[in-house]
Amino acid sequence: MDPIGPRLKILRGHYGFSQRELARKSGVSNATISLIEHGRTDPSMGLLKRILDAMGVSFADFFSSESRPAEKYFFASDELSVISSGPISFRQVGSDLSDSKLQLLHERYQPGADTGRSMLSHDAEEGGIILQGRLEVTVGDQVQVLSAGDAYLFNSRLPHRFRNTGREDCVLVTVCTPPSF
Amino acid sequence: MDPIGPRLKILRGHYGFSQRELARKSGVSNATISLIEHGRTDPSMGLLKRILDAMGVSFADFFSSESRPAEKYFFASDELSVISSGPISFRQVGSDLSDSKLQLLHERYQPGADTGRSMLSHDAEEGGIILQGRLEVTVGDQVQVLSAGDAYLFNSRLPHRFRNTGREDCVLVTVCTPPSF
DNA sequence: GCCAAACGTTTAATTAAATTAACAATTCAA
DNA sequence: TTGAATTGTTAATTTAATTAAACGTTTGGC
């Protein structure tokens, strides 16, 4: 188990809560939030549950994401593997996705467009390639500004957020598992 | 979290450990084990981790099994959710929201019922067994009329079509995997 | 500039967890 | 039966988590 303090702090950050805000919502003291985030105390399970509840995160979610080892979320332009060149070229994000069932979308983000913070949705995969402009992508505790040619790929259970912080439109191609049901 | 005490007790029993045995292995006092199992105390995370470690169980395992105690394995006939009525009725085993990879259906084709020509499906397999009546099944360039006891199995990427050409209802059980991809 | 409000942190006081050591009940061997 | 070694529980003590209230910083008016 890695230290839960930093993870908890990141989680709180993604909801935009202050320590006192989260403390009020969960019914614990703000001091406790601070102490836990700094690893200066070992919270009881009941207390930890109250805190997670305030953010709508279950134990299962919290501890399943914990056991996830170093995954690669961002890929530089030159890291995309070229499947085929010529008049039509396919450049693949990630290693081997030949058997993943993903849907392709064409999206345009106007300046200032923001998906807001999104947490732990259903189990699915999301990916995309920036075609034009710049896009700030947040996944888990990582933030990256992607430019044309860059790409992302992650499991949508992870907290994520898209934001166009530039002054021009951002155009990208994205993939995600079908909106089932 | 639901009571972790009873679950912990069951887990301990599964390993055949006594309270003192588990206490020694995990480096906590036997009294604490007893208190936790009875819910008379709220263990700290670090302590619970030591106990789980002694049994080789991770947080992720412990809390992932927790999150699905409401799994349903058996379904009464009237519990099958009706997907569509009319000339062709589908009754699905399990919930529409189930994350199951397998879709199990109980289907009834009235005389003359016809799915029409279905092209392009998903990369999946589907099969079925006829229970009653007769059903004309078209797969690719092959056409066959199946009777009770007959069955079919094919990759659903192939164009396929189902038609009841007889004068009585046709009842069958079908499977499809995966459900919505 | 100032003041007020919010932020995160820290310290002392309180509350609760965790231990130690006892308890009664059971098992097993002598 | 007797005694020793288990079992699980409980009471009193110690230890640590949690709180309440303070601290120093920063932010945003006015």
Image (tube, coloured by chain):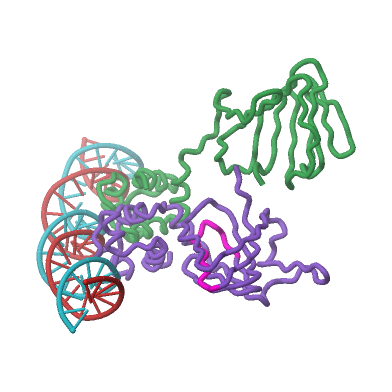
Chain colours: A purple, B green, C cyan, D red
Whether residue A116 appears in magenta in the rendering, the answer is no
- The reply to whether residue B30 is in sight is no
For the N terminus of chain A, give its image quadrant.
bottom left
Quadrant in the rendering for residue B145: top right
Residue extending furthest top?
B167
For the C terminus of chain A, give its image quadrant.
top right
Q: Name the foreground residue: B92 vs B18.
A: B92
Whether residue A154 appears in magenta in the rendering, the answer is yes
B170 vs D5: above or below:
above
Coordinates of residue B146 in the picture (x, y in percent)? 82, 26
C6 vs B101: above or below:
below
A125 vs B125: above or below:
below
Coordinates of residue B20 in the picture (x, y in percent)? 32, 52
Quadrant in the rendering for residue A13: bottom left
Q: Name the foreground residue: A174 vs B6.
A: A174
- The reply to whether residue B143 is in sight is yes
Is B107 left or right of B59, judged from the image as shown?
right
- What's drawn in magenta, residue-wise? A153-167
Quadrant in the rendering for residue A63: bottom left
Coordinates of residue C11 in the picture (x, y in percent)? 16, 74
Coordinates of residue A123 in the picture (x, y in percent)? 55, 52
Q: Name the foreground residue: D3 vs B57.
A: B57
Is B11 left or right of B23, judged from the image as shown?
right
Residue displayed at 59% across by 68% down = A170
Residue displayed at 41% across by 51% down = A58
Residue displayed at 80% across by 67% down = A88
